[in-house]
Image (spheres, helix red, strand yellow):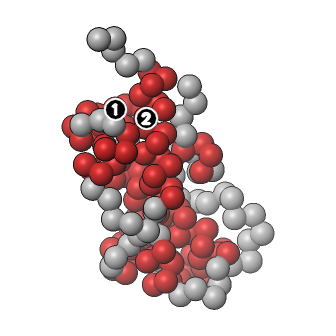
Amino acid sequence: MPTPTQSEYIARINKAFDYIENNISKQFTLKELADVANFSKFHFNRIFYGVVGETPFQFINRVRVERAAMLLISSKKDTISDIAIKCGFSDISIFSRNFKNFFGKSASQYRVEKGDVSNISQLDSNKRQPMLDPSTYFCSE
């Protein structure tokens, strides 16, 4: 049986990216993500880290916090709690801790400071990977 090529692995990891992106408010398990990509959970974790440079849950957390930052600016009618829930945080204190860890300020401070910024595509997360644009979450073959 031939071994999978790098492009096959990337295509399978991209399936997990799609699944995460389309279900970001959901709570994920490693087995669930591995099943989507057709890997064992241990192999998925290893391959994901090799391709992305983050564990699956580090990636999910970063995507959630960055999406929350964009929503804080673009969705003024939503409360911070509403945004946290939309982005998959089941507990506001966990969201607050993660947000402050990534951006160095509270979500409410961020919303006030960035509220009049017209270009929301450039977030200033101190943990941001060089791939903020969701299209760049996908690895090219």
In percent of width and height, residue 128 lies at 51, 52
Element assignment for label 2: helix
Residue type at mark 1 is: Ile
CB contact under 8 Å: marks 2 and 1 = yes
**Residue 12 badge:** 2
Q: Residue at x 55, y 40 (%)?
A: 138
Please determine whether, in this image, residue 104 is positioned above or below residue 22: below
Q: Is residue 65 left or right of residue 114?
A: left
In percent of width and height, residue 134 lies at 59, 51
Of 87 and 98, the residue lying toward us:
87
Please determine whether, in this image, residue 38 is positioned above or below residue 96: above
Q: Is residue 29 left or right of residue 68?
A: left
Labels 2 and 1: the sequence-earlier one: 2
Element assignment for label 1: helix
Of 2 and 97, the residue lying toward us:
2
| Residue that extends furthest to the front in the rendered view of this protein | 1
Residue type at mark 2 is: Arg
In what quadrant of the picture does the N terminus appear? top left
Q: Residue at x 33, y 53 (%)?
A: 57
In percent of width and height, residue 86 lies at 48, 74
Q: How many marks?
A: 2
Say which quarter of the image contains residue 45. Answer: top left
Q: Residues within 10 Å of mark 1 (few under 14, many from 20)?
A: some
Q: Is residue 10 left or right of residue 92?
A: right
**Residue 47 badge:** 1
